Amino acid sequence: MIGWSFVLLSAIMILIFYFYPMLQSLLLSFQSGTGANLSWVGAANYTRLFKDPVFLITVKNTVFYLIIQVPLMIILALVLSVLLNSKTLKWKGLFRTAIFLPAVTSLVAYSVIFKYMFGQDGLINVMLMKLSLLSEPIQWLTDPFWAKITIILAITWRWTGYNMIFYLSALQNIDSSIYEAAKMDGASAFQQFTKITVPLLKPIILFTSITSTIGTLQLFDEVMNITAGGPGNATMTISQYIYNLSFKYTPDFGYAATVSYAIVIMIVIFSIIQFRVAGDKE
């Protein structure tokens, strides 16, 4: 009873602010309308998903970000963590702090900065043209392809350092004698990385892959503040579509809840795939 008395308040708050909204939103997904005008439509919202061209575009965009950005970020974070774990590297603390700092910056603030940097007359185009790498500015924000690349660059800059910290922490728990034995057996640095580092970091890689997948499927701030989903819905994500359904278009909270549960289903599917690929049976 003493133990329960300590956790009872927290358990009640979790039920009220987590599980009740989850259940309520599930019930809401079977309704249509807003406020007091909600009406029960059953599975109509879910069948509507497959006929909704905007939703299908947002799924395509979100999956594109996922399959490009998540592997890129995981590999980059892994390589950086190995480099920053080197015993011979000087100023390690400075480098670690510099790479991790983007993870604690304001999402809105850095998104706005990226928007100005990648504008037609922004810093990126000016630098590339001064270096004679471009003959004319790249339309980073108005071309569908380059707008997606801008979003991917922004997310990668923001979250690579965050994932790097997990790998760096795990690397420091690996016994250095393992690498010394491998070096004595003639293993190269690349072989040590692929045969020792990656297998030993497998649980952490799986964890960061799943959390990064969840974060990318819920991507909102960067797209909203950098491209506003444009040009022509070319960068709009599922989360931004949910926002538009709720507050920008004619409000339809029921259908917005349905789209949000589509994200839940996608997260479950991608998580299962990642567990299968990683061979984790637990």
Image (cartoon, rainbow, N blue to C red):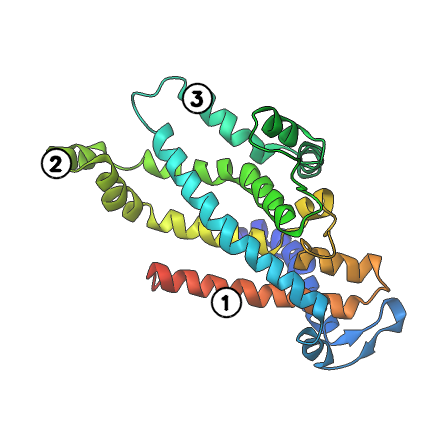
Q: Secondary structure at mark 3?
A: helix
| Residue displayed at 62% across by 63% down | 59
Q: Position of residue 170 (x, y in %)?
A: 35, 39
Q: Which residue does the numbered mark 3 point to in the structure image?
A: 93
Q: Position of residue 260 (x, y in %)?
A: 67, 64
**Is residue 10 shown left or right of residue 98?**
right
Q: Which residue does the numbered mark 1 point to in the structure image?
A: 269
Instruction: Give the quadrant of residue 81.
Output: top left
Q: Amino acid at mark 3?
A: Gly
Whether residue 4 is situated above or below residue 24 in the rendered picture? above
Q: Which residue does the numbered mark 2 point to in the structure image?
A: 186
| Residue displayed at 73% across by 52% down | 231
Q: Quadrant of the C terminus?
A: bottom left
| Residue displayed at 27% across by 40% down | 193
| First of labels 2, 3 by sequence position | 3
Whether residue 96 is situated above or below residue 215 in the rendered picture? above
Q: Amino acid at mark 2?
A: Gly
For this rendering, which residue is in front, 271 or 192?
Answer: 192
Q: Residue furthest right?
A: 36
Q: Secondary structure at mark 2?
A: loop
C-alpha separation, residue under disc 3 versus residue under disc 1: 38 Å
| First of labels 3, 1 by sequence position | 3
Q: Amino acid at mark 1?
A: Ile
